[in-house]
Image: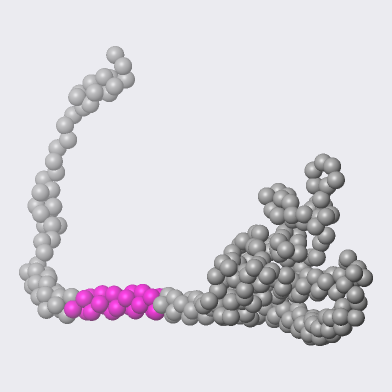
Amino acid sequence: MNDIEQTETLLRKAPRLKVPSGLREKLQAQIVLPRAQDSSRDRASLGLLRRWLPALSLSAFFLACVIAIAVQSNILSGLRRENASLRASGENLEQMRQENLEYQKLRAETQQLERLRQENLELRQLQNEVARLRQELQALSALKAENQRLLTERKIAESRIPADARPEEDPFEAARKKQERINCINNIKQIGLAARMWSNDHGDNLPPDFLTMSNELNSPRVLICPGDTRRSAALTWSEFGAGNVSYEIISPGVSETDPAVVYVRCPIHNNFGLVDGSAQMVDASQHQLVQKNGKWVIGRRPQNGPPSYE
């Protein structure tokens, strides 16, 4: 038997306690029940609470509205600040756009100015070339007068020399042919100048035919070589045709990138006009027109073997 069972056995054997007399009455006398006055006080408090409940509810609702308005005002202030920031950003963006437009405008004006400078430089070069050609034309007039004088002297000299004593080689005829070739060179120079003037407005490519650059050529008369007796010059461009030109365009529409390419030539005097506007008077016994890399250039006429290039 363990300790718990021994304890239970002792408790069972212990004598029962007797209830003191009058304990019940004494306990009842000590119990204090709530009085009716307290109940009425509670009812009064409950009625007061009921009277003030609408006001308290309204106050709470008003307080909630004030809080909501404060929150909305705070949100509205934040939205206003963001709106102001966006407006400032928009103004900055518009300012940047205006500055960009101004920059693009200035850049376009700078490019236009540079192009005008280049055109002005080319115009000055062309004016110098025109002035030089005018001087050559003036010299040509003097040469024509000198040629006429020599022809007159020749006729006078021929009239004084007997027919059987005249030399076989006529120096006056040689001088006339030389003058014709010089005049041919001048025509080719005018054609080259007109072609380069036309190319300035057409992507640096020379015209494909003579009629295309009619605005740049003063007259179609320069297209007739002085030594060409089979063709006659046209008075106006409306009368111009294939029978009114002595020269040949060897490289129609050629670019100005290769100045050594032959653009036009005279088949009578073997004179050549190059892409750079220069005119070459070459000896037909030593030079000829040859192709190099698909382009026509002036080459040295070989004695034996293939031609060599200048």
Q: Residue at x 62, y 73 (%)?
A: 232
Relative placement, left or right, of 247 versus 157 is left
Looking at the picture, does residue 19 appear above or below residue 132?
Answer: above
Q: Residue at x 38, y 75 (%)?
A: 79
Report if residue 212 is visible in the image: no
x then y, percent, for residue 308: 82, 48
Residue 259 lies in quadrant: bottom right
Which secondary structure type mostly characterizes the magenta part of the structure? helix
Which quadrant does the C terminus fall into?
Answer: bottom right
x then y, percent, for residue 7: 27, 23
Relative placement, left or right, of 72 versus 59 is right
Residue placed furthest toward the top: 1
Residue 35 lies in quadrant: bottom left
x then y, percent, for residue 46: 12, 72
Looking at the picture, does residue 56 appear above or below residue 310?
Answer: below
Q: Nearer the viewer, residue 167 or 134?
A: 167
Report if residue 260 is visible in the image: yes
Looking at the picture, does residue 254 appear above or below residue 84?
Answer: above
Q: Residue at x 71, y 61 (%)?
A: 267
Looking at the picture, does residue 78 appear above or below residue 168?
Answer: below
Q: Nearer the viewer, residue 266 or 6?
A: 266
Which quadrant does the N terminus fall into?
Answer: top left
Instruction: State which region is magenta.
Output: 58-80
x then y, percent, for residue 14: 21, 27
Q: Nearer the viewer, residue 180 or 294?
A: 180
Relative placement, left or right, of 130 versus 217 is right
Relative placement, left or right, of 15 versus 268 is left
Q: How is the image coloured?
A: one colour
Residue 67 falls inside the magenta stretch = yes
Q: Residue at x 72, y 73 (%)?
A: 226
Residue 263 falls inside the magenta stretch = no
Residue 206 lies in quadrant: bottom right
